[in-house]
Amino acid sequence: MHQPYLDQYWLTIKISLITAGAGCVLGLAIAYAVIREGTPRFLRTILTTFSGVAANFAGIPLAFAFIATLGTIGIVTTFMRDHLGFDPYAHGFNLFTQTGVELTYMYFQIPLMILVIAPAIDGLRQEWREAASNLGASSWQFWRHVGIPVLLPSILGAFILLFGNSFSAYATAYGLAGNGVFLIPITIGFYYSGNVLSDPHLAQALAFGMFVVLAVMMLLYIPLHRRSARWMR
Amino acid sequence: MRRRWIAPSAVVWLLVAAAFFLIPLIALLLFSLKSIQTGKCCSGAAYSYVIDDPQFLDTIRLSFQLSLETIAISLLLFVPTVYWVHLKLPRFRPVLGFIALVPFVVPPIVLVVGLLDLYKGAPEWFYAKPYGFLAAAYVILAFPYMFFALDAGFRSIDVHTLTEASQSLGASWLTTLVRVILPNIRVAALGGSFLTLAIVMGEFTMASLSAFRTFPTYIQRVNESQPYAAAALSLLSFLIVWVAMLALLFVGRGRPRPAQLAATR
């Protein structure tokens, strides 16, 4: 296989791993913050409803929202430049690169994690926490020995879901960077969309490669899903 | 040891989340209010540009009609299928569930490349028309969401008793399906329909690669010359998803939550 395509697969996989990992950690933290004892109920309703919307708000409009925020003349960029004296674009930040794509993907990765992991966190019973603290466990020890091990299959399952979510994304990256960030879906679209360099058969081969990666991920997902169902009532 | 007040770390996390999720939306709003000539706030020029552009109405109408068509075909295909599987072929249910995962695993970009090739020799009225090719592709895309919604609906009712009661009173299969079963799974069918609406109204990948002019591809084209108008349209697109999701919650209140995920990224 040609080196550039291998590099593109690798870049797509790398972006998916990074955004899935960060999405898992941040989504878990936010979901736990809203579900845990003491947080008012209505905040949870707001957060899950909003997550339902945000997880579905992707593609071209999401890309434009981030361009309006952190693009070269975005609202936050100009605010930082004019009022804080700090120009992110002069310090190596660029929305139209890998970092920008990753940041934008977080907008649908975190809500997806919240939606997927909330039922699992509900399954972490308050009694376990109380039992642990009665036995003198610190909050860290509770998470290290009880919380994370119980949630682990769910978290790994969610990780795979988030990986696939980001791996198959096309519209968001396209809206953000056009054909400028070399992700596999972008290259497929480029070779298929009837321009001068069109090569549908190459596009089909690349598409099949994507399918193989996702099929492997799915095979990993099924046993994890079975295991995580054990702790749910 | 019950906590009476919200934990400080929870406050921090929720504030960070609120900032991350709300700032891009606020930026979108401010961007859409900028004047096309000067780039300064505030003017309604982007909005009047959108309203005056005949393509705006054309594309949003096309996307809306496509979603209605997709919903109609999906319901006609899947309601009787899922009903029959629950009634007569319960062993077949996992197979259907597995098939429903396929559009989940195969990304839209892969699916559309395959479909465009598969239907290459199809008649003009199907292949070259959004109501043909694109609607067919969207039915596949919507299948998992429709299936899981309907499956949950059928699981919560007693299909056998309802069918037997209806038939012992002399109802035909069609009458049973339309007047007995359908009212009982209304919530599930509506839930699946709103998800499908959200999917089709926002779907870009397939429409773009098969070169049809739907609403999301229109936003993309507007952006090439009118970024502020594109921001206004993006905001509208966000509102459409909101409305579909609120409708989904509204019809499903007090019942097990339908799946809330309809991905078109």
Image (cartoon, rainbow, N blue to C red):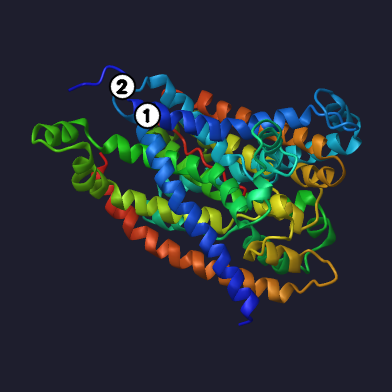
- Residue A196 in percent (x, y) is at 85, 71
Which corner quadrant holds the N terminus of chain A?
bottom right
**What residue type is disc 1 on?**
Ala
| Residue B42 appears anywhere in the view | yes
Q: Mark 2 sits on what residue?
A: A38
**What residue type is disc 2 on?**
Gly
Q: Assess whether mark 2 and mark 1 are in contact (beta carbons under 8 angstroms).
A: yes
Residue at 36%, 55% (x, y): give it.
B91
Q: Secondary structure at mark 2?
A: loop
Q: Secondary structure at mark 1?
A: helix
- Give the camera-side residue of B117 and B108: B108
- Residue B3 in percent (x, y) is at 25, 21
Q: Is residue A75 left or right of residue B95?
A: right
- Residue B111 in percent (x, y) is at 63, 61
Query: Within the image, what quadrant is residue A160 found in?
Result: bottom left
Q: Is residue B50 above or below residue A143?
A: above
Q: Is residue B6 above or below residue A5?
A: above
Q: Single out the mark in the foreground, 1 or 2.
A: 1
Q: Mark 1 sits on what residue?
A: B10
**Spatial separation of the CA atoms under disc 1 and disc 2:** 9 Å
- Residue A57 in percent (x, y) is at 61, 39
Number of callouts: 2
